[in-house]
Amino acid sequence: MNKTTRRILIVGGVAGGASCAARARRLCEKCEIVIFDRGPHVSFANCGLPYFVGEVIQQEEKLLVASPALFSDRFNIGVHTETEVLSIDRDNKSILVRDLNSGEERTEHYDALVLSPGARAIRPPLPGIDLPGIHVLRNIPDSQRIRAALKHAKRAVIVGGGFIGLEMAENLSGLGLNLTLIEKTAQVMPPLDPEMTVPIADRLIAEGVDLRLGVGVTAFAEMPQGGLTVTLDNGDSVETDIVILAIGVQPETSLAVAAGIELGERGGIKVDASMRTNDRAIWAVGDAVEVNDLITGVSQPIPLAGPANRQGRIAATSIIGGHPELQFRGVQATAICGVFGLTVASTGASEKSLIRCGNLAYEKVYLHPGSHVSYFPGATPIHIKLLFSSDDGRILGAQALGENGVARRIDVLSMAIQMGATVYDLEESELCYAPQFGAAKDPVNFAGMIAANHLRGDLPLAHWEDIADTQAKIIDVRSPAEYERRHLPGALNIPLESIRQRLSDIPSDQEVWLICEVGQRAYYATRLLMQNGYKVRVLSGGMKSWDFISRSAL
Amino acid sequence: MNKTTRRILIVGGVAGGASCAARARRLCEKCEIVIFDRGPHVSFANCGLPYFVGEVIQQEEKLLVASPALFSDRFNIGVHTETEVLSIDRDNKSILVRDLNSGEERTEHYDALVLSPGARAIRPPLPGIDLPGIHVLRNIPDSQRIRAALKHAKRAVIVGGGFIGLEMAENLSGLGLNLTLIEKTAQVMPPLDPEMTVPIADRLIAEGVDLRLGVGVTAFAEMPQGGLTVTLDNGDSVETDIVILAIGVQPETSLAVAAGIELGERGGIKVDASMRTNDRAIWAVGDAVEVNDLITGVSQPIPLAGPANRQGRIAATSIIGGHPELQFRGVQATAICGVFGLTVASTGASEKSLIRCGNLAYEKVYLHPGSHVSYFPGATPIHIKLLFSSDDGRILGAQALGENGVARRIDVLSMAIQMGATVYDLEESELCYAPQFGAAKDPVNFAGMIAANHLRGDLPLAHWEDIADTQAKIIDVRSPAEYERRHLPGALNIPLESIRQRLSDIPSDQEVWLICEVGQRAYYATRLLMQNGYKVRVLSGGMKSWDFISRSAL
């Protein structure tokens, strides 16, 4: 399409759609650009909704990133809210729209059509699912309904322990509600590996949330005296005043499907790297499309705001023409969530997804460095899991959680993954250091050093998964006091400081697995023992990782 | 050297030296490893000294990262503190050492020698420079002397506005002293470009620091009634109770020079990528060596703790042998400083250094994004300057300052520089986003998008340096109220929203330079005007950048 083309119509005016419209205007002053949205708002901050419910964001206007008037005055973009697009006539390049207030229908011609319909909350077909007390949170009207309902609520049940579920837990707790969080899988925060979510579960429980993991909902019912009963598949039931349903979303593809637009294998709209569908005049962006996972190559819908915005920008560029190098590269699934003071973030592949995918040989390390040097007040641990290629050291994914400094390390690792960096690059990274900001060896450096030491053969790793079956002798090199506090069954305690004197206590005819609190002393001991001829492995992350792993579904 | 070699001697046991010793032990259990240090401590946290003086770090023990006993018990490494190395006999591979307590001298043989002598504070030969009230801060005894002197001090003069000077300003202010900060150049924080330091100067002044920029010290004198007079080269003088001299450091090379070890052009010990000197049996690491700047290629001493630690690790690897791929890649000069709640950080080249170097065609953008989305409470601006190749978009350097989120963005950009990323990569970066943590378009994305828009020709940039001489018409596209508050001399006000109606007011026969508050609206106006045939440039960073630039020595 060249600049003589006139009409760009955009279905859905949030994130990807709004970005696409504004970018199209910047590239083509003469085009006619019109946004249609079923809802009352365009370009609203859907990521802020849990915080608006929680009254952290107090004014609804704050959520309106750009009003229809701003689109009109600043960008000369037409916006039709409360206008539903009913169908696409691809042959005639037109859409049928209905004004939801007047009920009037009309046909709008397009030269380029952009589908940005988003995703809708999944509402499983359970008995009572449509009862008035059961809410989803996808837009401002949803949040208004929840706020209204909360005025008379003392108890809430959140179904689903993903991002929205956890953010809602924090916000509803902040409003003083008694909370039950029900999650069907054995862990909260599904993008993470199970062992990395244990501290989140601990935090939820410490904050008074009644956490029910591995439990599904089978029915909702109204109680005669008001309120709802939520029946669970383990026979329990929970009484509540309000239910927040946050079990995920699914791409909104009905319009596309009806028009014969091709979907991908996982049900999202299929697009190329220019965000173009199988119809040359139709593009699609945002939560409704399938995108390639940069690490695993799997094509799937990944509902994230950042990629949606970039997709909108790329679609507009493709529509107007020029800059053919601006292509969507895929999604790393970088994500972050704040929950009761903990920050949880991840980028790239999880171990679960690598196992599911099955085509990448990987290794993993755990570490628990401080957010900054221990000699400066206020340092808190960051729990990190780094996944990397066991072939060439390429970084495949990272997960981290802690009180401070988590976003920073995951962002650095996200950039590293984007650029194809290896663990050897992490070893040599030069990151900000002053005592209150980090360490001369930053957590990112440490992650790289541990992984590189392993790949070089200097630090053979044992796998926690094998600990139940191993014939190896486990030696704990912490102090006797630490050992007394807790230790692995069958572990022999030889403190690092006395290991040179006690070599004869260490079996030389079998493999030895070393453990300490976080992994550092075990590493020192490994080097010492390897050079004395022992066959040694290290349990990465030490007892601190065991604290998580032993309590997870790993 | 192979593993049969016995004795590794290390001169200087802080940062690089301590890292080298520990790494050498991990790689070679049978080697004899001995550290000599002139001072009373090894492996102390010199970066923490300003905070120990300021009583943010309260216990001196906290500064001792590893004691001689720990080196001995854990690593079987000998430590001789208060032991000076007097000379190196390269032919006989031995050093002459003196026990500073007993005065006894002895010769120690080495197979490998590591020089990690560090740098010493520069003390210019001014009258009175050796008066007792004048302090430098390089080690724990220095900090103890300063703490003792502060007991009777109400006023302090800090000479030097670099990292240590600013950290000392924050800490001494925290102790309630009246402060004067004297800096010979026209800006604080010399690694940054001058315009980026204006907010730091403002903050110092707001915190009550008497800041004297562009002023040198000519003499110190004792006053009869006690205290010191500091005489300045502008004729002023300042009375004080204590002086902190923080005008920089110079490599401690006397031992190396006397032994004929080669120095680099800028006076640091010359080493190869394995940290080896011109003597095959001698390595050198840390503040005493010259390293290549990764961006400019210039070889110079760059005293930073992170590189020193990595160098120690690499030197040890080279000494023991194996892993020849572990080489020092050079320094990006990533650095960070906290000063009165502001965080200031940079990585890669500054514009000053690019001009000085002269061999790289570069361009720059300024931006002032929020630390997170504006709709979530608590967002504060981050002022960013990004330098990139005007040939291929490769990122050359970045500077940032603000209250929050600064370390994170500079660390991401540091990783980007390390991996050879371009501004096009920054456009497509996928970073952590939730409302309290960032934005769907992160500041790093924005920096990349602005720079890439420029390189693609969609956003031609005007240079602030040319503003005094330009014949271009300057058009300010902010609102009339914003324009009234302040504007560039001669700027015509046409708000973005009315620009489509007022095209006839814009001269089409001359270049037009557009400005707004931070650059975004000027960008929109640029796109609009360019497509209407106007020749347009944008003043990057808008009035917010002008606030800094107009008050700097740029």
Image (cartoon, coloured by chain):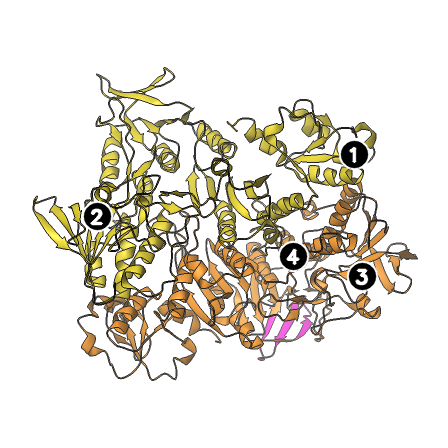
Chain colours: A orange, B yellow
Towards the viewer: A272 or A385: A272
What chain does mark 3 sit on? Answer: A
Task: Give the total number of marks visible in the rendering.
Answer: 4
Q: Which amino acid, mark 3? A: Ile
Q: Which amino acid, mark 4? A: Ala
Q: Which residue is mark 2?
A: B41
Q: Which residue is mark 4?
A: A305
Q: Which residue is mark 1?
A: B499
**Nearer the viewer's eye, disc 3 or disc 4?**
3
**Nearer the viewer's eye, disc 1 or disc 4?**
1
Residue at the spot x=39%, y=62% of the render?
Answer: B325
Inter-mark Cα distance, 1 to 3: 31 Å
Relative horizontal placement of residue B407, taking residue B448 as reference (left or right): left
Relative horizontal placement of residue B252, taking residue A295 as reference (left or right): left
Inter-mark Cα distance, 1 to 4: 31 Å
Q: Which amino acid, mark 2? A: His
A41 in relation to B361, above or below? below
Is residue B519 visible in the rendered image? The answer is yes
> Pointer 1 and pointer 2: residues touching (CB < 8 Å)?
no
- Position in image of residue B135 (x %, y %): 26, 32
Q: Is residue B276 part of the magenta span, yes or no? A: no
Which picture quadrant has residue A456? Answer: bottom left
- Discs 2, 4: same chain: no
Towards the viewer: B357 or B309: B357
B153 in relation to A3, above or below? above
| Image: magenta residue range | A219-238
Q: Which residue is mark 3?
A: A282
